[in-house]
């Protein structure tokens, strides 16, 4: 997927295409994670769509919950979703910046 150590660096056009593919993949991970949160908050927390979207978005980005969960099931979901969200968000950032970091490292290595 990435060029190897001894290979030439790819063209700017190919790099942009690669970055778009990685961005689409990162966005899909983020979208699926948000849908999981919305569904869980609607089902476990008895929230309406907009409140579930707000809670899922806030947890996914690390801001914290908005509504208080009253049942044990809702609290369990919120706990596991918060743990999942931390890992998912960091993974999305890694996927998104991987092509840029690789290109930078490849350019540095070529200059040696």
Image (cartoon, rainbow, N blue to C red):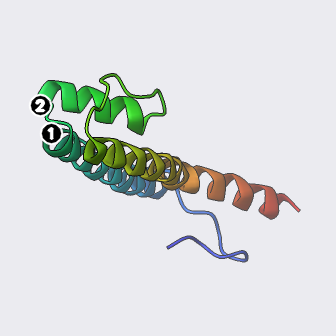
Q: Please state the horizontal and vertical placement of residue 91, each as a whole percent of the image.
A: 50, 54
Quadrant of the rendered image containing residue 6: bottom right
Looking at the image, which residue is at 20% across and 37% down?
A: 45
Look at mark 2 in the image and give the residue it sits on: 49
Residue 27 appears anywhere in the view: no
* Mark-to-mark CA distance, 1 and 2: 7 Å
Image quadrant occupied by the C terminus: bottom right
The crowding category of the residue bearing disc 2, from other C-alpha atoms within 10 Å (few below 14, some 14 to 19, many at least 20), is: few
Mark 2 and mark 1 in contact (Cβ < 8 Å)? yes
Residue 42 circle label: 1
Residue 32 circle label: none
Q: Please state the horizontal and vertical placement of residue 63, each as a whole percent of the image.
A: 47, 27
Looking at the image, which residue is at 62% across and 63% down?
A: 9
Q: Is residue 1 left or right of residue 56?
A: right
Looking at the image, which residue is at 34% across and 54% down?
A: 29
Q: Is residue 60 left or right of residue 111?
A: left
């Amino acid at each position: 997927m990435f060029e190897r150590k001894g290979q030439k660096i790819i063209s700017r056009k190919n790099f942009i295409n690669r970055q778009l593919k990685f961005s689409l993949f990162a966005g899909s991970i983020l979208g699926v994670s948000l849908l999981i949160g919305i569904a869980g908050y609607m089902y476990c927390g008895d929230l309406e769509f907009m409140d579930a979207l707000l809670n899922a978005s806030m947890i996914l980005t690390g801001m914290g919950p908005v509504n208080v969960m009253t049942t044990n099931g809702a609290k369990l979901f919120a706990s596991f979703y918060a743990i999942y969200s931390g890992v998912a968000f960091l993974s999305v950032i890694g996927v998104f910046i991987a092509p840029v970091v690789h290109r930078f490292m490849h350019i540095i290595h070529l200059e040696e």
